[in-house]
Image: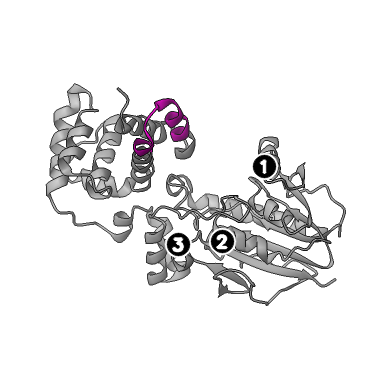
Protein backbone atom coordinates (compact mmCIF):
# COMPACT_ATOMS: atom_id res chain seq x y z
CA UNK A 1 0.00 0.00 0.00
CA UNK A 2 1.33 3.42 -0.98
CA UNK A 3 1.35 5.84 1.95
CA UNK A 4 2.03 9.56 2.15
CA UNK A 5 5.29 8.94 4.02
CA UNK A 6 6.43 6.33 1.49
CA UNK A 7 5.89 8.74 -1.40
CA UNK A 8 7.63 11.50 0.55
CA UNK A 9 10.59 9.26 1.35
CA UNK A 10 10.98 8.13 -2.26
CA UNK A 11 10.83 11.73 -3.46
CA UNK A 12 13.34 12.90 -0.86
CA UNK A 13 15.81 10.19 -1.87
CA UNK A 14 15.64 11.49 -5.44
CA UNK A 15 16.14 15.06 -4.26
CA UNK A 16 18.95 14.31 -1.81
CA UNK A 17 20.87 11.68 -3.78
CA UNK A 18 20.20 12.61 -7.40
CA UNK A 19 19.76 16.38 -7.17
CA UNK A 20 16.21 16.20 -8.53
CA UNK A 21 14.12 19.36 -8.29
CA UNK A 22 11.55 19.05 -5.52
CA UNK A 23 8.59 20.41 -7.48
CA UNK A 24 9.26 18.25 -10.54
CA UNK A 25 9.91 14.94 -8.81
CA UNK A 26 7.09 15.35 -6.30
CA UNK A 27 4.51 16.32 -8.91
CA UNK A 28 5.20 13.23 -10.99
CA UNK A 29 5.10 10.93 -7.97
CA UNK A 30 1.84 12.38 -6.68
CA UNK A 31 0.24 11.90 -10.09
CA UNK A 32 1.07 8.19 -9.91
CA UNK A 33 0.25 7.70 -6.24
CA UNK A 34 -3.58 7.76 -6.12
CA UNK A 35 -3.33 9.37 -2.67
CA UNK A 36 -6.30 11.28 -1.26
CA UNK A 37 -6.23 15.07 -1.34
CA UNK A 38 -5.45 15.14 2.36
CA UNK A 39 -2.55 12.73 1.96
CA UNK A 40 -1.26 14.67 -1.06
CA UNK A 41 -1.14 17.81 1.07
CA UNK A 42 0.65 15.94 3.85
CA UNK A 43 3.14 14.47 1.38
CA UNK A 44 3.84 17.90 -0.08
CA UNK A 45 4.50 19.32 3.37
CA UNK A 46 6.82 16.45 4.23
CA UNK A 47 8.85 16.81 1.03
CA UNK A 48 9.04 20.58 0.89
CA UNK A 49 9.48 20.96 4.64
CA UNK A 50 12.15 18.30 5.02
CA UNK A 51 14.03 19.72 2.04
CA UNK A 52 13.76 23.29 3.31
CA UNK A 53 14.76 22.37 6.87
CA UNK A 54 17.53 19.96 5.88
CA UNK A 55 20.26 21.62 7.90
CA UNK A 56 18.09 21.90 11.00
CA UNK A 57 17.02 18.27 10.70
CA UNK A 58 20.64 17.18 10.41
CA UNK A 59 21.50 19.18 13.53
CA UNK A 60 18.69 17.50 15.44
CA UNK A 61 19.85 14.04 14.39
CA UNK A 62 23.63 14.40 14.52
CA UNK A 63 23.64 14.78 18.32
CA UNK A 64 22.92 11.08 18.50
CA UNK A 65 24.94 9.73 15.55
CA UNK A 66 28.54 8.64 16.04
CA UNK A 67 29.31 7.77 12.41
CA UNK A 68 27.68 9.09 9.21
CA UNK A 69 24.71 6.96 8.08
CA UNK A 70 24.34 5.90 4.46
CA UNK A 71 22.50 8.45 2.25
CA UNK A 72 19.12 6.66 2.29
CA UNK A 73 19.19 6.37 6.08
CA UNK A 74 20.23 10.00 6.39
CA UNK A 75 17.21 11.00 4.32
CA UNK A 76 14.91 8.87 6.47
CA UNK A 77 16.27 10.44 9.67
CA UNK A 78 15.66 13.90 8.22
CA UNK A 79 12.09 12.92 7.40
CA UNK A 80 11.50 11.75 10.94
CA UNK A 81 13.17 14.77 12.52
CA UNK A 82 11.06 17.12 10.42
CA UNK A 83 7.86 15.49 11.60
CA UNK A 84 8.98 15.67 15.23
CA UNK A 85 10.30 19.22 15.30
CA UNK A 86 8.41 21.16 12.65
CA UNK A 87 5.33 19.32 11.35
CA UNK A 88 3.51 18.86 14.63
CA UNK A 89 3.16 15.11 14.19
CA UNK A 90 2.69 13.23 17.51
CA UNK A 91 5.96 11.51 18.50
CA UNK A 92 4.55 7.99 18.49
CA UNK A 93 3.31 8.40 14.92
CA UNK A 94 6.39 10.27 13.66
CA UNK A 95 8.75 7.67 15.07
CA UNK A 96 6.70 4.54 14.43
CA UNK A 97 5.64 5.32 10.87
CA UNK A 98 9.12 6.48 9.88
CA UNK A 99 10.80 3.42 11.37
CA UNK A 100 8.37 1.28 9.36
CA UNK A 101 9.91 2.66 6.17
CA UNK A 102 13.42 1.61 7.17
CA UNK A 103 15.12 -1.58 5.97
CA UNK A 104 15.39 -4.17 8.76
CA UNK A 105 19.15 -3.72 9.07
CA UNK A 106 18.81 -0.07 10.22
CA UNK A 107 15.37 -0.15 11.81
CA UNK A 108 16.71 -0.29 15.36
CA UNK A 109 19.16 2.51 14.68
CA UNK A 110 16.51 4.80 13.19
CA UNK A 111 14.16 4.04 16.07
CA UNK A 112 16.80 4.84 18.70
CA UNK A 113 17.89 8.10 17.10
CA UNK A 114 14.37 9.43 16.49
CA UNK A 115 13.26 8.54 20.02
CA UNK A 116 16.14 10.63 21.36
CA UNK A 117 15.26 13.49 19.02
CA UNK A 118 11.72 13.38 20.37
CA UNK A 119 12.74 13.54 24.03
CA UNK A 120 15.96 15.58 24.30
CA UNK A 121 15.68 19.37 24.16
CA UNK A 122 17.63 21.00 21.34
CA UNK A 123 20.32 23.63 21.83
CA UNK A 124 20.90 25.07 18.37
CA UNK A 125 24.51 25.68 17.35
CA UNK A 126 23.50 28.90 15.55
CA UNK A 127 20.48 30.84 14.37
CA UNK A 128 21.27 29.94 10.77
CA UNK A 129 21.27 26.25 11.72
CA UNK A 130 17.94 26.66 13.51
CA UNK A 131 16.44 28.40 10.48
CA UNK A 132 18.18 25.93 8.15
CA UNK A 133 20.13 28.19 5.81
CA UNK A 134 23.72 27.90 4.63
CA UNK A 135 25.90 30.30 6.60
CA UNK A 136 26.83 32.24 3.47
CA UNK A 137 23.19 33.12 2.74
CA UNK A 138 22.58 34.16 6.34
CA UNK A 139 25.75 36.23 6.42
CA UNK A 140 25.01 37.86 3.06
CA UNK A 141 21.46 38.87 3.94
CA UNK A 142 22.57 40.11 7.35
CA UNK A 143 25.16 42.32 5.67
CA UNK A 144 22.58 43.55 3.14
CA UNK A 145 19.58 44.05 5.44
CA UNK A 146 20.88 44.30 8.99
CA UNK A 147 20.32 41.76 11.76
CA UNK A 148 16.62 42.34 12.44
CA UNK A 149 15.35 42.53 8.86
CA UNK A 150 17.54 39.60 7.80
CA UNK A 151 16.21 37.36 10.54
CA UNK A 152 12.63 38.37 9.82
CA UNK A 153 13.08 37.73 6.09
CA UNK A 154 14.79 34.37 6.67
CA UNK A 155 12.05 33.34 9.09
CA UNK A 156 9.29 34.35 6.66
CA UNK A 157 10.90 32.42 3.82
CA UNK A 158 10.58 29.25 5.89
CA UNK A 159 6.79 29.57 5.79
CA UNK A 160 4.59 28.50 2.93
CA UNK A 161 4.10 31.09 0.21
CA UNK A 162 0.72 32.76 0.05
CA UNK A 163 -1.34 32.25 -3.08
CA UNK A 164 -2.20 35.44 -4.96
CA UNK A 165 -4.60 35.23 -7.88
CA UNK A 166 -5.04 38.02 -10.42
CA UNK A 167 -8.48 39.11 -11.57
CA UNK A 168 -8.02 37.03 -14.73
CA UNK A 169 -7.31 33.86 -12.72
CA UNK A 170 -3.55 33.75 -13.21
CA UNK A 171 -1.67 32.79 -10.05
CA UNK A 172 1.19 35.25 -9.55
CA UNK A 173 2.98 36.60 -6.49
CA UNK A 174 1.90 40.12 -5.63
CA UNK A 175 5.45 41.50 -5.93
CA UNK A 176 5.64 40.29 -9.53
CA UNK A 177 2.32 41.96 -10.25
CA UNK A 178 3.73 45.17 -8.79
CA UNK A 179 6.72 45.00 -11.15
CA UNK A 180 4.45 44.63 -14.16
CA UNK A 181 2.38 47.58 -12.96
CA UNK A 182 5.56 49.68 -12.63
CA UNK A 183 6.10 49.45 -16.39
CA UNK A 184 2.94 51.62 -16.70
CA UNK A 185 2.14 50.17 -20.09
CA UNK A 186 -0.77 51.59 -22.09
CA UNK A 187 -2.78 50.41 -25.05
CA UNK A 188 -0.89 52.53 -27.56
CA UNK A 189 2.53 51.17 -26.67
CA UNK A 190 4.86 48.41 -27.83
CA UNK A 191 6.53 46.65 -24.89
CA UNK A 192 9.29 44.03 -24.75
CA UNK A 193 9.63 41.50 -21.92
CA UNK A 194 13.17 40.21 -22.44
CA UNK A 195 13.23 37.21 -20.05
CA UNK A 196 9.55 36.44 -20.10
CA UNK A 197 8.92 32.79 -19.18
CA UNK A 198 6.60 31.58 -17.82
CA UNK A 199 4.70 34.67 -18.96
CA UNK A 200 3.19 36.14 -15.82
CA UNK A 201 4.48 39.65 -16.37
CA UNK A 202 3.98 39.48 -20.15
CA UNK A 203 0.32 38.59 -19.76
CA UNK A 204 -0.15 41.30 -17.14
CA UNK A 205 1.32 43.81 -19.60
CA UNK A 206 -0.83 42.49 -22.44
CA UNK A 207 -3.94 42.92 -20.30
CA UNK A 208 -3.37 46.70 -20.42
CA UNK A 209 -3.90 46.60 -24.18
CA UNK A 210 -0.22 47.14 -24.99
CA UNK A 211 1.39 45.23 -27.84
CA UNK A 212 3.69 42.84 -26.00
CA UNK A 213 6.68 40.93 -27.34
CA UNK A 214 7.59 38.13 -24.92
CA UNK A 215 11.05 36.67 -25.46
CA UNK A 216 13.01 33.89 -23.83
CA UNK A 217 16.09 31.87 -24.66
CA UNK A 218 14.60 28.40 -25.09
CA UNK A 219 11.73 27.17 -27.23
CA UNK A 220 10.16 25.12 -24.43
CA UNK A 221 9.99 28.21 -22.24
CA UNK A 222 8.50 30.28 -25.04
CA UNK A 223 5.84 27.60 -25.54
CA UNK A 224 4.95 27.99 -21.86
CA UNK A 225 4.42 31.73 -22.37
CA UNK A 226 2.23 31.03 -25.39
CA UNK A 227 0.15 28.49 -23.48
CA UNK A 228 -0.44 30.88 -20.59
CA UNK A 229 -1.37 33.73 -22.90
CA UNK A 230 -3.77 31.53 -24.87
CA UNK A 231 -5.43 30.27 -21.70
CA UNK A 232 -6.06 33.88 -20.66
CA UNK A 233 -7.25 34.89 -24.12
CA UNK A 234 -4.46 37.44 -24.53
CA UNK A 235 -2.52 38.33 -27.66
CA UNK A 236 1.24 38.10 -27.01
CA UNK A 237 3.96 37.92 -29.66
CA UNK A 238 6.30 35.11 -28.59
CA UNK A 239 9.93 35.05 -29.70
CA UNK A 240 12.89 32.79 -29.04
CA UNK A 241 15.71 35.25 -28.44
CA UNK A 242 18.91 35.69 -26.44
CA UNK A 243 18.51 38.68 -24.15
CA UNK A 244 22.24 39.40 -24.36
CA UNK A 245 21.97 39.68 -28.16
CA UNK A 246 18.40 40.74 -28.97
CA UNK A 247 17.26 40.70 -32.62
CA UNK A 248 15.39 44.02 -32.58
CA UNK A 249 16.16 47.43 -34.06
CA UNK A 250 17.34 50.20 -31.76
CA UNK A 251 14.57 52.36 -30.34
CA UNK A 252 11.79 49.98 -31.37
CA UNK A 253 9.98 49.77 -28.01
CA UNK A 254 8.22 52.28 -25.81
CA UNK A 255 9.14 50.22 -22.77
CA UNK A 256 11.40 47.26 -22.03
CA UNK A 257 11.10 45.05 -18.98
CA UNK A 258 14.20 43.15 -17.89
CA UNK A 259 13.10 40.66 -15.26
CA UNK A 260 16.60 39.28 -15.10
CA UNK A 261 17.84 35.80 -14.16
CA UNK A 262 19.00 36.07 -10.54
CA UNK A 263 19.96 34.14 -7.44
CA UNK A 264 16.33 34.03 -6.25
CA UNK A 265 17.39 34.84 -2.69
CA UNK A 266 14.15 36.76 -2.19
CA UNK A 267 11.94 33.87 -3.28
CA UNK A 268 13.32 30.96 -1.27
CA UNK A 269 9.93 30.23 0.28
CA UNK A 270 8.74 28.98 -3.13
CA UNK A 271 11.82 26.89 -3.90
CA UNK A 272 12.65 24.57 -1.00
CA UNK A 273 15.82 23.20 -2.57
CA UNK A 274 17.17 26.49 -3.93
CA UNK A 275 19.05 27.40 -0.77
CA UNK A 276 21.14 24.25 -1.18
CA UNK A 277 21.68 24.66 -4.94
CA UNK A 278 22.79 28.27 -5.23
CA UNK A 279 26.44 28.99 -4.39
CA UNK A 280 28.31 32.29 -3.89
CA UNK A 281 30.09 31.88 -7.24
CA UNK A 282 26.68 31.61 -8.94
CA UNK A 283 25.79 35.10 -7.75
CA UNK A 284 28.98 36.44 -9.29
CA UNK A 285 28.19 34.75 -12.61
CA UNK A 286 24.61 36.07 -12.54
CA UNK A 287 25.76 39.63 -11.91
CA UNK A 288 27.81 39.45 -15.11
CA UNK A 289 24.86 38.02 -17.06
CA UNK A 290 22.52 40.68 -15.69
CA UNK A 291 24.92 43.41 -16.73
CA UNK A 292 25.13 42.05 -20.28
CA UNK A 293 21.34 41.79 -20.57
CA UNK A 294 20.83 45.30 -19.24
CA UNK A 295 23.46 46.70 -21.59
CA UNK A 296 21.90 44.92 -24.60
CA UNK A 297 18.34 45.92 -23.71
CA UNK A 298 18.88 49.64 -23.16
CA UNK A 299 19.32 50.61 -26.86
CA UNK A 300 15.96 49.01 -27.71
CA UNK A 301 14.10 51.75 -25.80
CA UNK A 302 12.98 54.76 -27.85
CA UNK A 303 13.98 58.26 -26.67
CA UNK A 304 11.67 59.19 -23.79
CA UNK A 305 10.78 55.53 -23.23
CA UNK A 306 11.14 53.39 -20.12
CA UNK A 307 13.46 50.61 -19.01
CA UNK A 308 12.37 48.61 -15.96
CA UNK A 309 14.80 46.19 -14.30
CA UNK A 310 13.73 43.68 -11.65
CA UNK A 311 15.14 40.70 -9.76
CA UNK A 312 13.57 38.43 -7.13
CA UNK A 313 16.58 38.78 -4.88
CA UNK A 314 17.60 41.20 -2.14
CA UNK A 315 21.22 42.00 -2.92
CA UNK A 316 22.72 45.25 -4.09
CA UNK A 317 25.20 43.43 -6.35
CA UNK A 318 22.35 42.06 -8.46
CA UNK A 319 20.41 45.31 -8.60
CA UNK A 320 21.44 48.83 -7.63
CA UNK A 321 25.16 48.20 -8.07
CA UNK A 322 24.65 47.87 -11.82
CA UNK A 323 25.74 50.97 -13.73
CA UNK A 324 22.94 53.21 -15.00
CA UNK A 325 22.73 52.56 -18.76
CA UNK A 326 24.23 55.27 -20.96
CA UNK A 327 21.66 57.78 -22.14
CA UNK A 328 19.24 56.98 -19.29
CA UNK A 329 18.27 58.78 -16.12
CA UNK A 330 16.74 57.27 -13.00
CA UNK A 331 12.99 57.58 -12.63
CA UNK A 332 12.68 58.81 -9.04
CA UNK A 333 8.90 58.49 -8.78
CA UNK A 334 7.53 56.08 -6.21
CA UNK A 335 5.74 53.10 -7.77
CA UNK A 336 1.98 53.58 -7.80
CA UNK A 337 1.25 49.98 -6.79
CA UNK A 338 2.85 47.88 -4.05
CA UNK A 339 4.58 48.03 -0.68
CA UNK A 340 7.99 49.23 -1.81
CA UNK A 341 10.76 50.81 0.26
CA UNK A 342 13.49 53.00 -1.15
CA UNK A 343 16.69 51.07 -1.88
CA UNK A 344 19.48 53.18 -3.33
CA UNK A 345 18.16 54.50 -6.63
CA UNK A 346 15.64 51.64 -6.79
CA UNK A 347 12.87 50.08 -4.74
CA UNK A 348 12.76 46.91 -2.69
CA UNK A 349 10.16 44.80 -0.93
CA UNK A 350 11.22 42.29 1.72
CA UNK A 351 9.45 38.95 2.26
CA UNK A 352 8.20 39.82 5.73
CA UNK A 353 6.96 43.29 4.85
CA UNK A 354 3.97 42.42 2.69
CA UNK A 355 3.85 38.61 2.64
CA UNK A 356 5.41 38.53 -0.83
CA UNK A 357 8.59 37.35 -2.46
CA UNK A 358 11.54 39.66 -1.97
CA UNK A 359 12.07 41.87 -4.99
CA UNK A 360 14.16 44.80 -6.20
CA UNK A 361 12.94 47.03 -9.01
CA UNK A 362 14.64 49.97 -10.73
CA UNK A 363 13.08 52.25 -13.34
CA UNK A 364 15.00 54.28 -15.92
CA UNK A 365 13.88 56.72 -18.57
CA UNK A 366 15.80 57.26 -21.81
CA UNK A 367 16.87 60.86 -22.04
CA UNK A 368 18.77 60.74 -25.31
Image spot of residue 346 (x, y percent): 62, 71
Nearest to N terminus: mark 3 or mark 1: 3
**Which label is found at residue 139?**
none
Residue at 64% x, 54% y is 260
Residue at 71% x, 74% y is 331
Look at the numbered disc 2 and give the secondary structure of its residue: helix
Q: Which residue is mark 1?
A: 231
Nearest to N terminus: mark 2 or mark 3: 3
Query: In front: 55, or 173?
Result: 173
Query: In front: 232, or 87?
Result: 232
Query: Closer to the observer: label 1 or label 2?
Result: 1
Is residue 363 rendered magenta in the image?
Answer: no
Q: Which residue is mark 3?
A: 140
Look at the numbered disc 3 and give the secondary structure of its residue: helix
Q: Which residue is mark 2?
A: 175
Crowd rating for badge 3 (residues with CA inside 10 Å; few <14, some 14–19, many 20+): some
Is residue 356 found left or right of 106 in the rendered image?
right
- Occupied quadrant, residue 242: top right
Residue at 36% x, 43% y is 45
- Occupied quadrant, residue 342: bottom right
Is residue 62 found left or right of 216 in the rendered image?
left
**Residue 268 visible in the current orientation:** yes
Q: State the CA–CA distance, disc 1 to disc 2.
A: 22 Å
Nearest to N terminus: mark 1 or mark 2: 2
Can you say which quadrant of the picture contains the C terminus?
bottom right
Span of residues in magenta: 25-40
Amino acid sequence: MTTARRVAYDALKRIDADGAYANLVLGAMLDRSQLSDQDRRFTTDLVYGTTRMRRACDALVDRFVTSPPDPATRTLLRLGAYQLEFAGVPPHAAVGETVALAPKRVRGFVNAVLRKVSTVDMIWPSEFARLSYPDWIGDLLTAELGDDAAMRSLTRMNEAASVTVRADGYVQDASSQWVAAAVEATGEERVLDTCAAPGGKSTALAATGATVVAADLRMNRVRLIAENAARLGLDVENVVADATDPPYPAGSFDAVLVDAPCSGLGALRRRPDARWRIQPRDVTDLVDLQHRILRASAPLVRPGGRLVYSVCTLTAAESIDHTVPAGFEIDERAPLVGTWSRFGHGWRVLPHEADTDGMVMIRYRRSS
